[in-house]
Image (spheres, rainbow, N blue to C red):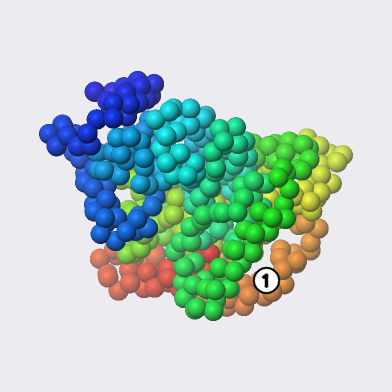
Amino acid sequence: DYLEMDEERKIQALCEELATRRPLKRPNYPYSEQTAGELKILETAKAGRDRYGERAIVTSIVSNTEGVSDLLGLVVLLREAGLVTPEGESALHIVPLFETIADLRNCVGIMDRLLSIPEYRRLVDSRGGLQEIMVGYSDSNKDGGYLTSGWELYKAEIALIELFQRHNVRLRLFHGRGGTVGRGGGPSFEAILAQPAGAVDGHIRLTEQGEIISSKYTNPDLGRRNLEILAAACLEASLLRPDRDDVPPEFLEAMEELSASAFKAYRALVYETPRFDEYFWGSTVINEIATLNIGSRPASRKKLGKIADLRAIPWVFSWSQCRLMLPGWYGFGSAVQAWLMAHPEDGLDRLRAMYRDWPFFKAQLSNMAMVLSKTNVAIASRYADLVEDGELRDAIFQRIRDEREASIEALLQIMQDETLLDGNPLLSRSISNRFPYLDPLNHLQVNLLRDYRRDADDPKILRGIQLTINGIAAGLRNSG
């Protein structure tokens, strides 16, 4: 019956269950097969803690949190597994993960309701009055594009900080960042300093994923250096920043307008263009990526081929392989054009002031400049030629090319540079020095893809594609 309840009835039922303080286990209770499996996992976690100590497992994360019942349901299962006592003491931090644009916009209401429930607040108090919240970069980017994702994350953090101060609960933000800019990557020092005031406050938690682990931490000296960078940024953001942001209201208003325009442009291409999914599957290595033994989950949640069902990691990775890096910039050019048309007199001056005086906006633009410097339209056009329908191919690729040119022009206008990465010659030289090795791999990959799609039974061709995928990813570095 529980699965058929609406959200309010679920909350009521779960609160009543938690308020009973009954003995921990009911072995004969008729759990569904899925719930029984989840309970078994939690019981294994309990056994692991008992054997290896409390620090073995300290956190339980609820992916794709969409409502209060998602958290309360986990609490009930944790109690069944012995990780929450009948008196309301939790052995683990219970962490919601807000992933999509809609979830980020709803997270404050969800947490406000949760912290107002006595049974849940008792759990938070048992963990030292600390509530950890994870915010997802990958899915929000795939959902709304780079600019909107960053802005919605920024606004959610500000609102959560104010909410937790009101509830007198300590907040620790957990940033689910990936290696590529399209999944929250980029220079860690600048990313931490770009957080709103109060978001760090002495502690921060973030993920390092994929190729970033080997590139940053394989060498002990390099690993130490990267950890020092994270510690220095955390200290500076905590001790040398005011308690409240002094971001001018006109900056916030401008960012809201830019985000709305970028969101509209991104959604129009990815989710509203007829047969865009067909173009994507034809012009990228998404099918071949699925054959690699990487990642913990399949490339798509369903076998329907829809963009909405595709997981965020292969989505970003595919666009980097064909040298378009679309999730890291698309929509920005349209947003700036719309802004300048609406504010012809002072629009550009305001954007330049935002870049100069606002760390958040500066970090956004710097990351886009880095991503766009790795794109190559000539190579990307060869991948587009793999799409069999010429009319579909030309229509969509031209839109992408026009948006890329508009985005580069907008960046150069705002940053007042002649070329991308003018202000970072060391990075510019590092990227350009890799192109002579990267470009041939892309051309080889296109030829192999064409052969493989004609004869999918040849394992040598597939092996060659997989090797080029690894080589291109290594050369691009923050590619997925």
Q: Is residue 346 left or right of residue 311?
A: right
Is residue 332 visible in this depiction of the protein?
no
Quadrant location of residue 292? bottom left
Q: Residue furthest right?
A: 345
Residue drawn at (16%, 32%) of the image: 29
Is residue 211 visible in this depiction of the protein?
yes
Q: Is residue 69 left or right of residue 231?
A: left
Q: Residues within 10 Å of mark 1 (few under 14, many from 20)?
A: some
Quadrant location of residue 341? top right
Quarter holding the N terminus is top left
Count of numbered circles on the image: 1
* Above or below 180: residue 351: above
Q: Is residue 95 left or right of residue 266?
A: left
Q: Residue furthest left?
A: 28
What residue is shown with label 1? 428
Residue drawn at (62%, 43%) of the image: 154
Of residues 288 and 210, the one nearer the viewer is: 210
Q: Residue furthest front?
A: 87
Q: Amino acid at mark 1?
A: Ser
Quadrant location of residue 468? bottom left
Of residues 242 and 428, the one nearer the viewer is: 242
Q: Is residue 103 left or right of residue 331?
A: left
Q: Secondary structure at mark 1?
A: helix
Residue drawn at (21%, 46%) of the image: 40
Residue 43's spot in the image, x, y percent? 23, 48
Residue 314's spot in the image, x, y percent? 42, 55
Residue drawn at (37%, 69%) of the image: 466
Of residues 103 and 323, the one nearer the viewer is: 103
Residue 18's spot in the image, x, y percent? 32, 29
Residue 235's spot in the image, x, y percent? 65, 59
